[in-house]
Amino acid sequence: MPDKRFGPRRARETRKPEPICGDPQFFLCESCGSVFQLIGTADAEVRCCSAPMKKLQPVPLEAGCGLMIDYEIVGGFNENAVKVTWSSSTDALAPEWICLKTFTGGQLKYIPPSKHSIVFALADTDAYCYCDEDPCLECTFRCKRGFALFAWNRELGLLQVPMDKMKAPAPQGSRKSP
């Protein structure tokens, strides 16, 4: 039987939290290729190389673009994490970094060329979960709905992957009795 005590990283909320932050904003310097993340919701002119930076608009990741990104909620009741995996048709299409938007903010990780997965550890409000399944059953409660992944690739641009997967429940009577 799983340990149902609350660990130090486990959320204490009794219901799913509401997101308190908007989507991250990213800007591209067309001179040097730098990408900058703006924190907050203010519309500010961001400059680099003595010129205004271009605000990047995330586009949904589409099948056939040469990059597949998937995620899985792992860890169960006290050790919540988001495991992100990807595959690309060429090394040039692999993500350079991935940002996870959560209920309370976000995390950004740069990707070494040899990696094909990363794990974002969650704590406090972001670690809210309904049950203790590991990996997540992707049920109708969708505990991480509102989270999103943003991936950057110079060729494909800024890609967005919503975290709203849900598996259909097994039909009634489909379980075998012992």
Image (cartoon, rainbow, N blue to C red):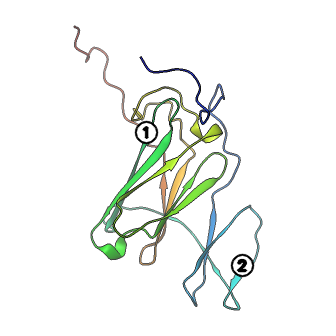
Secondary structure, mark 1, is: strand
Mark 1 or mark 2, which is nearer the start of the sequence?
Answer: 2
Secondary structure, mark 2, is: loop
- 59 vs 42, left or right, is left
Q: Using the image, determine if residue 10 lies above or below residue 28.
A: above
Q: Residues within 10 Å of mark 2 (few under 14, many from 20)?
A: some
The percent coordinates of residue 88 (x first, y second) are 31, 66
Asked which quadrant contains residue 18, the reply is top right
Which amino acid is tagged 2? Val
The residue lying toward the viewer, choosing from 68 and 120, is 120
Residue placed at 51% from the left, 30% from the top? 141
The residue lying toward the viewer, choosing from 3 and 32, is 3
Q: Residue 74, labelled with which disc? A: 1
- 169 vs 164, left or right, is left
Which amino acid is tagged 1? Val
Identify residue for label 2.
46
- 83 vs 54, left or right, is left
Asked which quadrant contains residue 125, the reply is top right
